[in-house]
Image (spheres, rainbow, N blue to C red):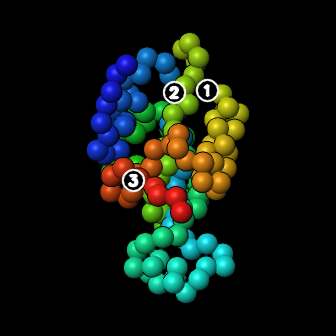
Amino acid sequence: MTTFELSHFDDFLAIASQQSEPQKLLLVLAKRELPHGHTEEQARAFAEGHGGHLAPLAGIDKQPSELEGFTAFVEEAKQVGSEWDAVFVAALPGTGDRLPSTKEIDDAIEKVIHAIRNGMINNLLVFDRSGTPLQINHG
């Protein structure tokens, strides 16, 4: 079993680029927000940069070769038009020499968005706007 350390999004991109099978990277932009029905205490903590949850905004799919690095991704993400705080990342491998189909990609992005909304993010990587991996605490 190969082990690796991710200290930046670009580390993930380098690993994805080395895979033998063709793949699409699924990138879901998310914004930090307060939950509905939040308390005043939660609002104060949120204003200080703590708490809240990450709500998915938009999904993007790219081949690893289509991304030059995190800085280029941030510039491209501006086209989405939304302010975002984090990006959730997953990889969808193809079969043989074939990339996943458009339907497979769309379905996978929907599954990622659904997983984020339901807090089922253990199988996803998440990076902040500087490309640093985040550890999400539930609770």
Mark 1 and mark 2: span between their CA atoms? 7 Å
Q: Earlier in the sequence, mark 1 or mark 2?
A: 2
Instruction: Describe the element under mark 3 as helix, strand or loop.
Output: loop
Residue sitting at the far top: 96
- Local packing at callout 1 (Cα closer than 10 Å; few below 14, some 14-19, many 20+) is some
Q: Which residue is mark 3?
A: 134
Please tell me whether residue 47 is drawn above or below residue 19 in the rendered image.
Answer: below
Q: Earlier in the sequence, mark 2 or mark 3?
A: 2
Asked whether disc 1 touches disc 2, contact meaning CB atoms under 8 Å apart, the reply is yes
Q: Residue at x 66, y 43 (%)?
A: 111
Q: Earlier in the sequence, mark 3 or mark 1?
A: 1
Camera sees residue 82: no
Asked which quadrant contains residue 100, the reply is top right
Amino acid on which the number 3 mark rests in the picture: Leu
Question: Residue 60 vs residue 134: left or right?
Answer: right
Instruction: Describe the element under mark 2 as helix, strand or loop.
Output: strand
Q: Which residue is mark 1?
A: 100
Residue 52 horizontal/vertical position (percent)? 52, 70
Q: How many marks?
A: 3
Amino acid on which the number 1 mark rests in the picture: Pro
Q: Which residue is mark 2?
A: 23
Mark 2 and mark 3: span between their CA atoms? 23 Å
Question: Residue 75 vs residue 26: left or right?
Answer: left
Q: Residue at x 45, y 63 (%)?
A: 85
Asked whether disc 2 touches disc 3, contact meaning CB atoms under 8 Å apart, the reply is no
- Local packing at callout 2 (Cα closer than 10 Å; few below 14, some 14-19, many 20+) is many
Which of the two marks, 3 or 1, is nearer to us in this view?
3
Asked which quadrant contains residue 12, the reply is top left
